[in-house]
Image: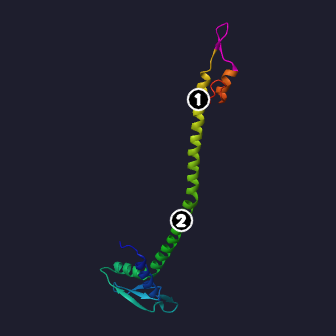
Amino acid sequence: MNELTPEREQDIRTRRGHIVDAPWGSRGDGEGGNTVQAGAYITPTEGFASSGDVAHIVARTPEQSYRRASFIARAPHDIDDLLTEIDRLRAQLADKQDRLDHLHRNSLPDLRREIDFQRDSKKRWRNRAETAEQRLHDAAMTRTWTNEDGKKFVFVEDIAPALLGRKTAEAGEQL
């Protein structure tokens, strides 16, 4: 199939524009042939009439002749329908392209910002988890005491700085 280039399409539209005596019709000649006629119309007194013959179609069988003549007679109207459909589909494609361009312009930057925010949020939570692990470790390393019955305990003053992430008075470092 040949590509429908803009030039080829314009040629088709120009040729179709030259056919001003449509609609066309066809009628059998009684001998197996059919005549395609321009400006076909039906009158109350004469029946089928036209403004002139376009082509006389003869085929191997009357059925083939009729089908070919019907195809040719219908061609101007069919071409109009196809060109109208091409225009409709192009408009629909242009609308969809406009929507896609709008999404690219407006949604992609928003999505990128959200991805960056989530990435930064993940870093913040990782840092918080690492800090919590360090505090837990420091709390676990707090000096324990043993009372008279052998149970171990810690003083709140010893463990609080580790749990709260405050500096201890002795070490002067961040726990």
Q: Is residue 108 magenta?
A: no
**What residue is drawn where x is 50% and y is 74%?**
87
Q: Is residue 155 magenta?
A: yes
> Magenta span covers which residues?
145-156
**What residue is drawn where x is 65% and y is 13%?**
145
**What residue is drawn where x is 61% and y is 31%?**
132
Vertical placement of residue 119 versus 35, above or below: above
In this rendering, the label closer to the viewer, 2 or 1: 1
Label 2 or label 1, whichever comes before in sequence order = 2
Query: Looking at the rendering, which quadrant does residue 154 occupy?
Result: top right
Left or right: residue 154 compared with residue 58:
right
The residue labelled by disc 2 is 96
- Residue 18 coordinates in the image, percent (x, y): 44, 88
Look at the numbered disc 1 and give the secondary structure of its residue: helix
Look at the numbered disc 2 and give the secondary structure of its residue: helix
The residue labelled by disc 1 is 134
